[in-house]
Image (tube, rainbow, N blue to C red):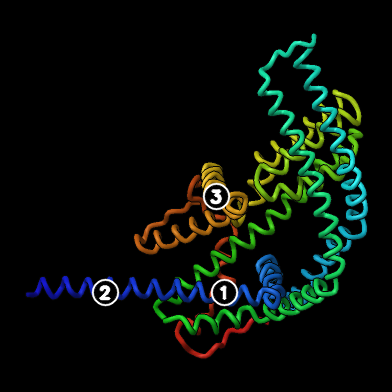
């Protein structure tokens, strides 16, 4: 009878958990539908969230150096404004002119590349490769030309649409900056108050999980931006010094596409090779591709690991595994988000493992499990005050 009652209790508990999970899924689905209808209204909050994630770390570091929190936020805003102003006033005009010229020249480059292919594969009028290979190359050339034309027309359409909605976009950005400013200003207090909602026995786990996610996302976004900026600048400088036509635009394109791992250098090498070959000489094409390849190797072997290692600490094997898994399951979006998702999963796994086993898993000289430099300070900056953990009044305030 006792075993029967225990079995019934287990099945009852399992049924309750199953219905609870179904309820959560239904609530999430409903929330997604509501969010879909409120997309326009939520745009400023989405932009503000990205600003908060990126600036949370720098603001915390400045406040730890005795700078008032409002002044720290103002310094970060000023630095961002300088970057945007330089991009709009210096980079954007040159980039726009060269991209337009490159888009106009690319179909002709593709035609010349196909003729060169025919000349190489038919040296004496007799094909030396199977016919299906030549057909495949022709189809690839036509597809690439059509894609470039489509992208160009879409770019014009997007430009007109962006121009017609410029006022709305500027308004959304201004509102997002205001939301982000006040959120960053009161972030320690907001975290303290949010932790009061969490049951006391779960507060430490919730605080650590929130700090881990925030630290990794912020580090990944900042690191991705810096890495793309450096890669784009190196490719653009190298191609411009060689005299490759449209080298500046090709470098910027390679830097922007470098946000998706391995994509930027491949596209940049293709454009640089075609531009150097048909806008200069075979030797120019060779050196152009060599420059892009050298930058890619420098980024993969030295630059990217050092930029990402501070907050997104993943072994190269885990990085490759996460990228392959992400692109297999979710395509390009999966590849884009694979690294931060894997890093967050690893961070939470390490925390719960060390908490349950009471053993230290990460070490300063570890390989798969290495302690990220600055992680403790970042987590401590986001954790609620001790008074919040005990449920008392909020005495700790950060000026």
Mark before the other along the chain sequence, 3 or 1: 1
Residue 339 seen from this side: no
Direction bottom: furthest residue: 393
Residue 358 is at least partly visible in this image: yes
The image quadrant of residue 86 is bottom right
**Disc on the earlier residue, 2 or 3:** 2
Up-down relation of residue 82 to residue 254 (above or below): below
Q: Position of residue 16 (x, y in %)?
A: 30, 76
Tell me the crowding category of disc 2: few under 14, some 14 to 19, or many 20 or more residues within 10 angstroms, Cα based.
few
Task: Quote the CA–CA distance across marks 2 and 1.
Answer: 30 Å
Give whichever of 250, 199 is nearer the camera. 250
Report x, y in % for residue 318. Answer: 52, 46
Provide residue 296's location: percent of width, then percent of height. Answer: 71, 38
Residue drawn at (41%, 76%) of the image:
23
Camera-side mark, 3 or 1: 1
- Residue position marked by numbered label 3 in the rendering: 326
State how many labels appear.
3
139 to 32, vertically: above or below: above
Q: Image point 22% across, 71% down: which residue? A: 11
Identify the residue shown where x is 60% and y is 82%. 190
The residue identified by callout 1 is 33
Q: Earlier in the sequence, mark 2 or mark 1?
A: 2
The residue labelled by disc 2 is 13
Q: Secondary structure at mark 1?
A: helix
Mark 3 burial class by Cα count in 10 Å: few <14, some 14-19, many 20+: many
């Amino acid at each position: 009878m006792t075993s029967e009652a225990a079995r019934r209790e287990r099945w009852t508990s399992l049924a309750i958990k199953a219905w609870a999970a179904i309820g959560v899924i239904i609530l999430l689905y409903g929330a997604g539908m509501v969010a879909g209808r409120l997309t326009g209204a939520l745009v400023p909050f989405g932009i503000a969230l990205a600003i908060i994630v990126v600036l949370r770390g720098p603001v915390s570091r400045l406040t730890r150096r005795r700078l008032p929190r409002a002044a720290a936020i103002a310094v970060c805003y000023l630095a961002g404004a300088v970057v945007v102003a330089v991009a709009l006033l210096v980079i954007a005009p040159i980039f726009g002119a060269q991209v337009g010229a490159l888009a106009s020249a690319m179909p002709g480059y593709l035609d010349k590349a196909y003729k060169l292919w025919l000349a190489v594969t038919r040296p004496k009028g007799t094909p030396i490769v199977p016919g299906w290979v030549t057909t495949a190359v022709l189809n690839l050339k036509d597809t690439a030309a059509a894609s470039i034309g489509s992208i160009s027309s879409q770019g014009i359409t997007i430009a007109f649409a962006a121009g017609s909605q410029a006022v709305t976009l500027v308004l959304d950005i201004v509102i997002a900056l205001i939301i982000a400013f006040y959120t960053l200003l009161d972030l320690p207090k907001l975290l303290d108050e949010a932790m009061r909602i969490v049951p006391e026995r779960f507060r430490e786990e919730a605080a650590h999980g929130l700090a881990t996610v925030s630290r990794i996302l912020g580090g990944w976004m900042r690191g991705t931006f810096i890495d793309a900026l450096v890669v784009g600048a190196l490719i653009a400088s190298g191609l411009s010094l060689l005299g490759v036509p449209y080298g500046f635009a090709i470098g910027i394109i390679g830097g922007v596409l470098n946000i998706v791992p391995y994509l930027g250098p491949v596209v940049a090498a293709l454009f640089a090779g075609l531009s150097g070959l048909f806008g200069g000489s075979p030797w120019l094409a060779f050196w152009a591709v060599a420059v892009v390849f050298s930058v890619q190797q420098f980024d993969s072997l030295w630059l990217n690991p050092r930029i990402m290692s501070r907050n997104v600490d993943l072994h190269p094997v885990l990085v490759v595994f996460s990228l392959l898994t992400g692109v297999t399951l979710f395509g390009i979006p999966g590849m884009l988000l694979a690294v931060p998702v894997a890093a967050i999963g690893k961070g939470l796994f390490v925390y719960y493992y060390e908490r349950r086993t009471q053993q230290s898993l990460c070490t300063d000289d570890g390989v798969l499990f290495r302690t990220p430099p600055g992680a403790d300070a970042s987590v401590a900056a986001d954790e609620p005050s001790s008074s919040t953990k005990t449920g008392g009044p909020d005495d700790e305030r950060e000026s």
